[in-house]
């Protein structure tokens, strides 16, 4: 099997790698972007648009560039390596994913070109406090009235929820609270009356928002996909998002491993560089192995995420997330150990990689959750 | 107006190179290669001239192994129109490169050739000048600013003590310095377009050029490590040291 990137993918990688390397060349720059009003650099976002990155996964008919999961992987790895703050995952992969898979022709025509040029940012309002990682556990309701639908409920930990212009909201139109049937997706303008937002910083330097919908009225045009049939889209698009997040994790682990090895070669103790101690060399190698295992599963997820077989896709994504989570924790913690005190100092970029990796570990399902998912279908490779 | 831009595939500028154990050169196996940064500036300038409507066609040329085709693709993704790869696995020295380029110029008949002032691998800084001599064309080296007029070009050059502007009659050779422009990143639409742009292949043999080396590398060594500095106690001491020891004041 050929895992080499095509010449076009190499060019894409080169372009985004260089952009990120120049924009995120120091922790000070990243901190400056984080303090901007939206929590990231709008100039870099505009540059993403200019380079066509915001149109990457959309089809050419919709105004995009027809990239697939591997192209998304290439971009997400680069964003991970630089610890980028821009809401690429939430707008392009997550929000864009819903539009691509569930959007009507009118919705696609209205929103995709705006995303591509960088004017529109999306966020998914899905998680609820009681739901843990169960995607079907939705208590927010959308009731049909003669004016459209009235949405009531609370959504928690909406990633990049403060900078979003448009929310993809999951709400219950029928069925029990944890039933897969009866979930409907809506595209809701962030400025619709009846929406209140409370934003806070997450530990990785990003932002998340608690959103309350109280009597929020949306028209029937806002329905994304079939009424009562939103769940399969949730599962599919979040699967794609996990694959993309895995790539970001691999990029971050790669940088953190590199940073650690560099530190081992530079830091002197007892008159020699600490990298000359064999026990530390072993640990650096263990980190590399964890990184490479994660990379294999990241690529597996990228290859399987387009599969038409939902069961196959589900188990591949969950298995990948299990490995990514384990590797992220191992690489992050070992990096701290090998650095010593400096490894968890806010003034040192290494600590920020560790925080982001820790955050990724719990996003869209932790290790136990995904291990359970894999076990439920009899393992990644079903017993013969 | 037709423009020829020359691009070389070299070790990426971010890579920390290592000398081969036998001292015959630097280790190139599994090393990231990219376009010579000065050539990137040349491509950028070419594309800007095209955007200004002063150039109608940009042809990118590279001499090297099959993978040098990737370097041409990068130039195409930045905005060049077509590529010519002169394929050879041999080590090509500046004179041979200049001869090959002279042959390509003869065939393509461009009005302007832009290239990097030097490549970051051998730092020779010879090819542009040699090409100008072989063709008998005027040359504007170390370009800081380029202004194309009717049948002529003004090249502002970075020289010791300031800037010098020379007026050249076209056709001419321009070699680029670091501050001429800041190269763009290849955008996704242009990467897709580059896929469809033509890339022709030829070889030194087909062009009738002998590339056999005339120089012999005696040895390659790594630069010596940086020595530790000293802390001085006062400004007076620093001035004293600069005067007496460094002799710079």
Image: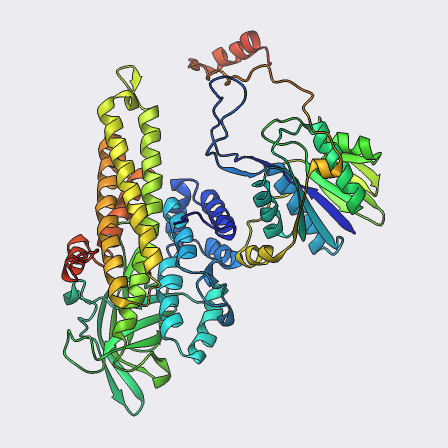
Q: Name the residue at 41% across, 49% down.
A: A2
Vertical placement of B238 versus A224: above or below? above
Residue A225 location (% of width, % of height) = 33, 78
Residue A204 location (% of width, % of height) = 28, 49
Q: In this view, does A384 lie to the left or right of B240?
A: left
Taking the image as drawn, is residue B164 in sight? Answer: no
Residue A342 location (% of width, % of height) = 27, 32
Nearer to me, B87 or B84: B87
Looking at the figure, which quarter contains the C terminus of chain B? Answer: top right
Please count the marks in the image: 0
Residue A178 location (% of width, % of height) = 15, 73
Vertical placement of B85 versus A261: above or below? below
Q: Name the residue at 19% across, 71% down.
A: A136
Q: In this view, does B204 lie to the left or right of A367?
A: right
Spot the residue most to the bottom.
A146
* Protein image colouring: rainbow
Q: In which quarter of the image is residue A319?
A: bottom left
Q: Name the residue at 21% across, 46% down.
A: A326
Nearer to me, B35 or B237: B35
Spot the residue most to the front.
A384
């Amino acid at each position: 099997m050929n895992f080499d990137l095509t010449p076009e993918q190499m060019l894409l990688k080169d372009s985004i790698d260089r952009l990120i390397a120049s924009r995120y060349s120091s922790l000070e720059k990243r901190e400056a972007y984080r303090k901007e009003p939206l929590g990231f650099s709008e100039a870099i976002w505009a540059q993403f648009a200019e380079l066509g990155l915001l149109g990457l996964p959309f089809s050419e008919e919709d105004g995009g560039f027809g990239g697939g999961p591997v192209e998304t992987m290439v971009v997400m790895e680069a964003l991970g390596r630089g610890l980028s703050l821009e809401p690429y995952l939430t707008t392009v992969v997550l929000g864009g994913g819903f539009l691509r898979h569930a959007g009507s022709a009118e919705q696609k025509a209205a929103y995709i070109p705006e995303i591509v040029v960088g004017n529109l940012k999306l966020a998914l309002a899905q998680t609820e406090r009681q739901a843990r990682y169960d995607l079907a556990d939705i208590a927010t309701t959308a009731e049909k009235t003669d004016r459209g639908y009235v949405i009531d409920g609370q959504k928690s930990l909406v990633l990049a929820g403060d900078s979003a212009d448009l929310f993809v909201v999951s709400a219950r139109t029928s069925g029990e609270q944890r039933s897969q049937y009866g979930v409907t997706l809506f595209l809701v303008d962030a400025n619709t009356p009846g929406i209140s937002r409370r934003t806070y910083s997450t530990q990785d330097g990003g932002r998340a928002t608690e959103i309350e919908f109280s009597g929020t009225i949306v028209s029937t045009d806002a329905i994304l996909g079939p009424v009562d049939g939103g769940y399969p889209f949730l599962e599919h698009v979040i699967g794609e998002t996990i694959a993309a997040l895995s790539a970001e994790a691999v990029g971050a682990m790669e940088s953190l491993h590199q940073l650690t090895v560099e530190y081992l070669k530079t830091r002197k103790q007892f008159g020699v560089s600490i990298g000359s101690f064999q026990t530390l060399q072993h640990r650096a190698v263990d980190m590399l192995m964890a990184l490479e295992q994660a990379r294999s599963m990241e690529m597996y997820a990228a290859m399987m995420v387009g599969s038409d077989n939902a069961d196959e896709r589900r188990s591949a994504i969950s298995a990948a997330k299990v490995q990514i989570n384990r590797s992220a924790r191992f690489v992050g913690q070992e990096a701290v150990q090998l650095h010593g005190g400096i490894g968890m100092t806010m003034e040192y970029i290494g600590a920020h990689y560790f925080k982001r990796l820790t955050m990724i570990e719990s996003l869209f399902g932790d290790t136990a959750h995904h291990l359970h998912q894999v076990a439920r279908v009899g393992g990644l490779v079903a017993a013969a | 107006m037709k423009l020829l831009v020359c691009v070389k595939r070299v070790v990426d500028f971010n890579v920390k190179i290592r000398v081969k154990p036998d001292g015959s050169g630097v280790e190139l196996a599994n090393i990231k290669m990219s376009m010579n940064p000065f050539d990137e500036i040349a491509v950028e300038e070419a594309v800007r001239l095209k955007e200004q409507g002063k150039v109608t066609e940009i042809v990118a040329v590279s001499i090297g192994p099959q993978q040098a085709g990737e370097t041409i693709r990068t130039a195409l993704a930045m905005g060049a129109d077509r590529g010519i790869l002169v394929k050879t696995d041999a080590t090509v020295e500046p004179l041979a490169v200049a001869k090959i380029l002279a042959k390509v110029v003869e065939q393509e008949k461009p009005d302007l050739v832009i290239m990097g002032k030097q490549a970051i691998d051998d730092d020779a800084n010879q090819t542009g000048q040699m090409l100008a001599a072989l063709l008998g064309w005027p040359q504007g080296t170390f370009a800081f600013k380029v202004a194309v007029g009717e049948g002529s070009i003004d090249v502002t050059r970075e020289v010791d003590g300031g800037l010098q502007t020379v007026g050249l009659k076209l056709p001419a050779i321009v070699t680029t310095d670091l501050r001429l422009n800041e190269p763009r990143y290849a955008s996704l639409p242009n990467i897709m377009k580059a896929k469809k742009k033509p890339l022709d292949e030829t070889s030194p043999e087909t062009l009738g050029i002998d590339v056999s080396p005339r120089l012999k590398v005696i040895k390659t060594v790594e630069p010596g490590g940086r020595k530790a500095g000293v802390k001085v106690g006062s400004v007076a001491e620093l001035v004293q040291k600069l005067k007496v020891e460094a002799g710079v004041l």
